[in-house]
Image (cartoon, rainbow, N blue to C red):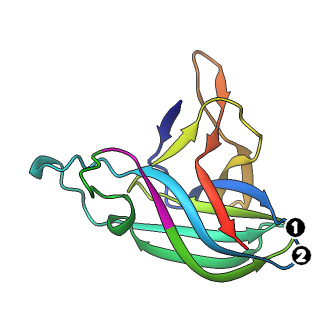
Amino acid sequence: MYEFFGPAAFDIAEAVKFTSPSPTWTLNRVEVLGFDGFNGTAQAIPRDRVISMEIRDANLNLIYKWTDSQLPYFNFRNNVTGPLVSLIDLPPVTVNGDFYICFYDRSAIFIGTELENATGNSFIFDRVAKQLVPAALPAGENQTLPVNWVIRAIGQ
């Protein structure tokens, strides 16, 4: 079962921790489940907004940054009026050991979350404080539910 989280502030990202399978593993694509709210009607035409993504090392140091509009990735297409799995191509980014994909939705889209089997590898990343907080959604009074962001690393 999936839910959607967002929109977040400009310096707050949905972050997922990954571990490269080899010391010379190359990240070249990121898969994200998201939805910008557009349902294919003139009454819900979305505004063009900027989204951003960063690749960070185990110490949260910036390795690569990507920025674009949400429209080519998370907007109505092929009669899909809900969440879309979008592939974001990157130039080859070599990562070694643990790394993070930090996705800044910037109030443009809602990011998909997996509500079951949370792995503990999904976080909220505060770029200003350079701090990670475990990802969780409200689940009642003074309770939260840990979640996985539906963000995947693809490489070779």
Segment colored magenta: 82-87
Residue 92 x, y percent position in the rendering: 66, 83
- Give the numbered dot on residue 97: 1
Q: Report the predominant secondary structure element of the magenta stretch.
A: strand
Residue depicted at x 34% and y 52%? 36
Up-down relation of residue 123 to residue 4 (above or below): below
Residue farthest bottom in this picture? 91
Three-letter code, disc 1: Gly
Closer to the chain start, of discs 2 and 1, is 2
Q: Is residue 84 magenta?
A: yes
Q: Nearer the viewer, mark 2 or mark 1?
A: 2
In this rendered view, identify the residue nearer to me: 24 or 59. Answer: 24
Residue depicted at x 45% and y 59%? 106
Residue farthest top in this picture? 141
Three-letter code, disc 2: Pro
Estimate how packed mark 2 is, as few (under 14), some (14 to 19) or many (20 or more) residues with alpha carbons within 10 Å: few
Q: For mark 2, give the secondary structure.
A: loop
Q: Is residue 67 magenta?
A: no
| Image-based side of 144 in relation to 40, left or right | right
Q: What residue sits right under mark 2 in the picture?
A: 23
- Give the numbered dot on residue 7: none
Distance of label 2 from label 1 (alpha carbons):
7 Å
Q: For mark 1, give the secondary structure.
A: loop
| Callout 2 touching callout 1 (CB < 8 Å) | yes
Residue 116 x, y percent position in the rendering: 65, 29
